[in-house]
């Protein structure tokens, strides 16, 4: 399209087209997570969460006299009991062990008691607890931004008419390219062009 126009019209046309392109083709980053690294903003493209269980073992030994016990409750003793068996059991050391499993794979607690003279002689408890360590890694990339490029354009309309002049190109956050150019033809008329380009994603080779 050729038409004689003034410089002010050209400038208004170029600025209006660029502003319109920035409003229509820039991306909305409001739904993306933005973090700061060394004072600069980046958008998170992927988050990797790694959960590790670190086993920690603790063993505690206690003497029976340090363990709290309530007052005994006495019952009537039958008259036909075997005193020797009672004394044998009374002076024997009996060992008890019980392991409690914690929920959600958090580990185990083992309690070991030694009973002597109807009392707890000693106690040992062992805790094997898995401490949960959660490591979060954010993979980031720089925020998309608008870029304004300047260059020149030359077009041959026919063998007797061609034009050359400056051009501006706007690269939006969505990788849309908008270009405008203005030139002066051989016939001293103003020639202007506009264009919009989008990347095509396909494989040229394996």
Image (tube, rainbow, N blue to C red):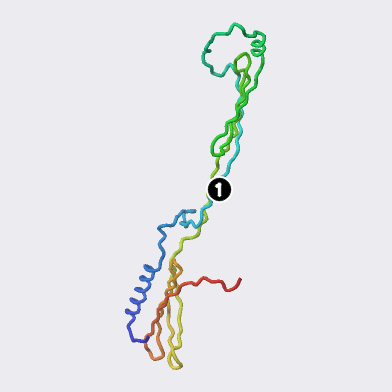
Reply above or below: 153 against 128: below
- Residue found at x 45% / y 80%: 152
* Closer to us: 84 or 135: 84
Reply above or below: 191 against 125: below
* Closer to us: 172 or 134: 134
- The x, y position of residue 182, in whole percent, is 40, 81
Which residue is situated farthest in the front direction here? 80
Q: Quadrant of residue 127?
A: top right
- Residue found at x 42% / y 60%: 29
Reply above or below: 184 against 89: below
Q: Which residue is mark 1?
A: 50
* Closer to us: 84 or 55: 84
- Residue found at x 50% / y 59%: 141
> Crowding at label 1, few (<14), some or many (≥20) Cα neighbours within 10 Å?
few
- The x, y position of residue 70, in whole percent, is 52, 15
Reply above or below: 133 against 88: below
């Amino acid at each position: 399209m050729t038409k004689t126009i003034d410089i002010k019209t050209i400038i208004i046309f170029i600025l209006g087209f660029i502003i319109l392109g920035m409003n229509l083709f820039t991306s909305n980053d409001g739904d993306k997570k933005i973090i700061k690294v060394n004072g600069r903003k980046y958008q998170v493209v992927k988050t990797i969460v790694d959960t590790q269980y670190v086993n920690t073992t603790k063993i505690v030994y206690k003497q029976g006299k340090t363990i709290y016990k309530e007052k005994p409750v006495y019952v009537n003793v039958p008259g036909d009991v075997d005193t020797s068996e009672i004394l044998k059991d009374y002076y024997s050391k009996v060992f008890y062990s019980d392991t409690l499993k914690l929920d959600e794979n958090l580990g185990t607690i083992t309690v070991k008691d030694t009973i002597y003279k109807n009392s707890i002689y000693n106690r040992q408890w062992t805790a094997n607890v898995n401490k949960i360590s959660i490591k979060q890694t954010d993979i980031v990339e720089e925020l998309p931004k608008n870029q304004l490029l300047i260059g020149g354009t030359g077009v041959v309309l026919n063998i007797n008419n061609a034009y050359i002049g400056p051009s501006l190109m706007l690269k939006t956050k969505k990788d849309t390219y908008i270009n405008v150019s203005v030139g002066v033809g051989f016939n001293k008329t103003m020639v202007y062009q506009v264009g919009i380009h989008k990347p095509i994603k396909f494989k040229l080779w394996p």
